[in-house]
Image (cartoon, helix red, strand yellow):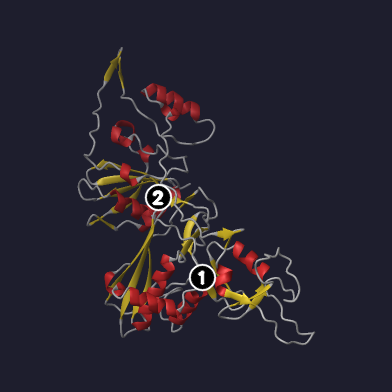
Amino acid sequence: MANRTNFVKVCNLPPGYSDARELFSLFSSCGQVQDMTAVEATTVIVSFSMRSGAENASFALSGATLGGNPVTVTPYFNMSDPQFFSNPVYQRLGQYIGQDQHVMDPNTFQPWGAASVAPMVAQPHQSLIRPPTLTLPNYNLGPGFGSMFQALGSFVGGAGPSYQPQPVAPPPVQLQPPPSATNGVPSDILSQYTTPWAAPPTQAADQPQCSICLSDLADTSSYDTDSTLAPVLSLSHCKHAFHSACLTALMSNSPSPFLQCPTCKKVYGIRTGTRPTTGTMTHRQMRSSLPGHGDCGTIELHFMFSPGIQGPEHPNPGHYYTPVGFPRTAFLPDNTEGLKALHGLYLAWEQRLLFTVGRSITTGQDNCVTWNDIHLKTKTSGGEHSYPDDQYLTNLGQDLAGFGITEAEISSHMGTHPGLRQNGRL
């Protein structure tokens, strides 16, 4: 079996490198970071909760720039390094392995030289030289290993596996309270966007139906009826009609106060999604052109997330989510239609529609930050999700419209944020 490890060694950092958030954000893109330890002036060892995180990092991040320096990222095998057993700086490596709920707080990172390390002082014990106190990593290797580590811990004078550091958790997402609602349905949506239905003259064999319950509109809905509403309602813009009880039931399952017509997908109200709030969206202009758009430059979009705790709108509230595969990039042509798309995507970002939490299609891992059915071009050329694609901007507009982001709203956003293209962020 090939050697695997939870650690990577990051070398060639600027001496005394201290930008913990930059370091944490970069390595969190590959997995759940549990600890970062400065072991030399230019070297940090990063600990992941899973070995796949270390493998992803060593594969994807070697050559990345941190603090202006290109760094090397290689797997670190602690049990093969004599310093792991003799150098106090190394002795807290792996202390959180097996504690899957632990995510490092970047504020706890100590740059090299920030805290002095007590030198090793040999203490006599009869005729033996007793090694310094050693706290062993809290490895979870299963039955049979506990007694071995206890014995080794007593030999070197350490606490052994009994040492249990307290996990540091990031603060939970604070959600805004929803508008006033009755039975989970915002009270003003139906009154604002519907009118009582006026039955058209029809033949007895051609009765209009409610497309939610598939019963005739003249019949009673199978859902409980709100006596304050007309039995059948028409949506104000598209004029499609439904039982008021069916609309109420439909909205009770909505994560935000909006109503989407089941027939034509027209959105009433503001649709919001479940994108984690620990992310950022930025962009930059590039002079290079995209295939199929040789007459203009390129807009490169940049998305980044840090780990956090799922809220009540996510699949597993209270559990951690992990941003695997971040930072991510996407590309638009830097022309008139591309600028409209840029504003539409920022609207989608503000309404938490671009990403969600779920199972990664790429890795099969649950509790990951994933795309949310608004399709972006993540490559400039070659293969899937790349250019050229003559229909892409049209299809993207349809994706946005399906989430309620209309051309009128995009035009309004462009008027409100005229300098967005140059600013690089909202």
- Residue 210 in the image: x percent, y percent? 69, 75
Residue position for label 2: 54
**Mark 1 → mark 2, Cα distance in angstroms:** 44 Å
Q: Which is nearer the N-term, disc 1 or disc 2?
A: 2
Q: In the drawing, what numbered circle is on residue 122? A: none
- Say if 278 sits above or below 115 in the image: below
Q: Residue furthest top?
A: 126
Q: Amino acid at mark 1?
A: Gly
The residue that disc 1 covers is: 269
Looking at the image, can residue 298 be seen?
yes
Q: Which quadrant: the C terminus?
A: bottom left
Which residue of the protein is positioned furthest toward the front in this rendering?
Answer: 228
Q: Residue at x 77, y 87 (%)?
A: 203
Task: Describe the element under mark 2 as helix, strand or loop.
Answer: helix
Crowding at dot 1, Cα within 10 Å, few <14 / some 14-19 / many 20+, comes out as some
Q: Does residue 98 appear left or right of residue 87 in this picture? A: right
Locate residue 271, reporting x and y percent: 50, 68
Q: Is residue 325 left or right of residue 258?
A: left
